[in-house]
Image (cartoon, grey):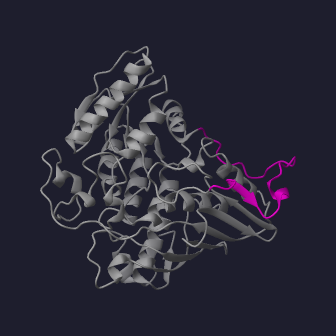
Amino acid sequence: MKNNIIQIGQIGFGRIAQGHNLPNVLPHSNVRVIAVCDVDRNRMADGKRFIEQWYRDRGTDGGIPDVHVYSDYRDMLARSDLDAVIISTPDHAHIGPCLAASDAGKDIYMEKPMSLTLEEGRRMSDQLRANGTVFQLGSQQRGSSPWPHFRRACSLVRNGRLGTLREVEIGLPGDPGGGNPAPMPVPPHLDFDAWLGSTPKVPYTEDLVHPQSGYDRPGWLRCEQFSAGMITGWGSHHIDTAHWGMGTEYTGPTLIEATAHFPTDDPEYSGLWNVHGDFQVTATYDTGVVMRISGDYPNGVRFIGDEGWIFVTRGSGVVENEPDAGNPDSPLQASSQALLAESEEPQSVHLYDGEEQHANWIRCITTRAETAAPPEIAHRSGSACLIAHIAMKLKRPLHWDPDNEVFIDDDEANAMRAR
């Protein structure tokens, strides 16, 4: 770290990088973003302009950096003056740069979900911890900003405000079908083979990747080759919050039952997008708590105990172009307002109290402390989503061993832990 300045590279410049990650990292005076990488040369150039313009507009003490551009993240990671990276790539493209950055000694902020498969998540968690990488997953609901009420809700539950916790209800949306499957010429500025990575080679169409004009919600989020859909998209946030409140951050469910509608269930379906639509998931934990996940519930997390319930959501705050995000009502509700009252009694459980997620990561880089969403917590939140997705695909009960991370006596389900 040169002159106590953390020098950062941005891997992947899409809507989340420009709308969320960089705006939350660039303002820190002990940070300098010096490089950007994308397999789409147009987006690579946009990223360079975005970062340099930010410094130009604010007249920072360090001047305007000459942001270097890369089409291959491995070339960026070879830089000895790079301390850390932000990974804002599609889900299927998390594991490559994550493992490479960790091996190169770079600290990592990575967008959720942790991984595309259970096997990938386990590999990443093991390697990140073995290397001592300061890693933060983009689980913003753990931060004191912008949604401190998530920590408050979880703290109330963990400290017995609801009595014995019995159930958790999680509201997540699904995605509709659609998308144009007709093959198109690959744009000359896109390295499509690099974008596909280790996934199967398929013909290019714009609805499969990202818009070639603008930064609207990309089609890959709705294609199972690259994403499991909203069960990992929004599920990575809300299931993580549920685990925080349940005290199950380092384990997982033992019984999972699910049904779901997929567009391809219709033999006449001719669209491209094939992630789940409407769904129902029931997950039972060793603690006896039953977690129910469905689009029938309001977007958020409801903890239900013997003494009442507490519901927490983001409120009206949303990520631009994210469907069905947030609710217009109060972000923290309860069956009785007394359940939300401050207590003068000492708390027996003290939850991690961190800053905004990017700020927390930056501080932990300098102190080498553990972040709010470290590798194993990130993996366990993601694995619960992926277990649910496998149950949705198989449409039958699955028994999961969270210690060994295998399905019990189920070869078909175990084969789906990897791709």
**Identity of the residue drawn at 44% across and 78% down:** 392
In the image, residue 333 lies in the stretch drawn in magenta:
yes
**In front of the other: 33 or 316:** 316
**Identity of the residue drawn at 47% across and 61% down:** 382
Residue 184 versus residue 52 in the image, above or below: below
366 relative to 32 in the view: left or right: right
In the image, residue 386 lies in the stretch drawn in magenta:
no
Q: Residue 309: image x %, image y %?
A: 75, 66
Residue 133 seen: no
**Identity of the residue drawn at 71% across and 54% down:** 332
Q: Quadrant of residue 409?
A: bottom left
**Magenta region, main secondary structure:** loop
156 relative to 196 in the view: left or right: right
**Identity of the residue drawn at 24% across and 33% down:** 69
215 relative to 181 in the view: left or right: right
Q: Quadrant of residue 298?
A: bottom right
Query: How many numbered badges does the structure rendering display?
Result: 0
Residue 172 seen: yes
* Boundaries of the magenta span: 328-355
Q: Quadrant of the C terminus?
A: bottom left
Q: Residue 256: image x %, image y %?
A: 52, 78
Q: Residue 364: image x %, image y %?
A: 52, 35
Q: Quadrant of the N terminus?
A: top left
Q: Residue 209: image x %, image y %?
A: 26, 56
